[in-house]
Amino acid sequence: TPLYIYNIDYIINQYKTLSKLIKWPKLRIYYAMKANYNPAILKILLKEGAYLDTVSPGEINLAMEIGYPPSRLLYTANNLTDEEVDEVHSKGILMNFDSLSRLEKYGKKYPGSNICLRFNPEVVAGEFTKIQTGGPLTKFGILIEDVSKVKELVNKYHLTVVGLHKHTGSGIQKAEQFLESMNNLLSIATKDNFPDLEFIDFGGGFKVPYKPDEHEYDYEDFGNKISNVFSDFCKKYGKDLEIKFEPGKYIV
């Protein structure tokens, strides 16, 4: 004891449902394994073609032991230590940086690297304050107004920004809030700012029911809106990028 029993059929169905709702040919679902890192669940999702959002070297070691290659992992962590950065970098995993100070340290030590950048989407959303990760009072993400400072560091250390990332919050109940944060991030994703983008990662935060009187959120219309917004963006950018999402509790 204790004994935990998980409904694998439900988990597979959630993963497949989300994959169908967001109609974009270059869709990548990165399961946020912090939601539940039971090895049996991770093995099933690996077979289904999932990628993983990781936030610690321990998660990376577990994922790789199960069989996830570095190319199917993204590392996003807050308040990183030098030791963490060195360990993750040595495994060839793409890192997602959310502060100017850490970006500069990484650039000095590993110039010429590919990186992802996490920006604060400047939208406050989520079920309660502790899981709202956007807005002026949060510690997560580079401020959008600091794009010029980011570009200086990127050029100084010959870094290549292959992806942009944001996470608004958890349990977002209004599609408008999610779409607003998407548009805020896309507003800086221009060829002038970041000419080498391969993907945009919009994080997770999909609402799930917790109480008997709560209903499943209808994501079909939401998925269509996301696809339309991203399609319009890619036309302006001049290239069809990958679109990534990081559902955690939505899957499990």
Image: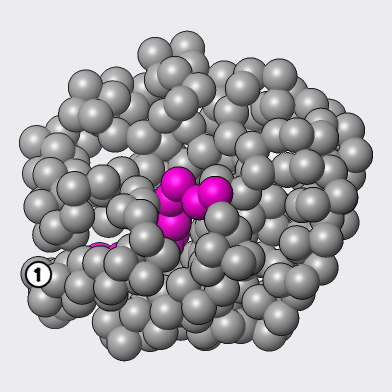
Compared to 192, does 87 lie above or below? above
Q: Residues within 10 Å of mark 1 (few under 14, many from 20)?
A: some
Compared to 69, does 117 lie above or below? below
What residue range appears in magenta? 196-208
Q: Quadrant of the N terminus?
A: top left
Q: At 18% across and 48% down in the image, what residue appears?
A: 25
| 21 to the left or right of 121 | left
| 215 to the left or right of 27 | left
Q: Please tell me whether residue 213 belongs to the stretch shown in magenta.
A: no
Q: Nearer the viewer, residue 62 or 50?
A: 50
The residue identified by callout 1 is: 220
Compared to 19, does 237 lie above or below? below
Where residue 191 sits, quadrant-wise, is bottom right
Q: At 44% across and 57% down in the image, what residue appears?
A: 200
Label the magenta part by its dominant secondary structure: loop
Where does residue 245 sit, x and y in percent of width and height? 36, 54
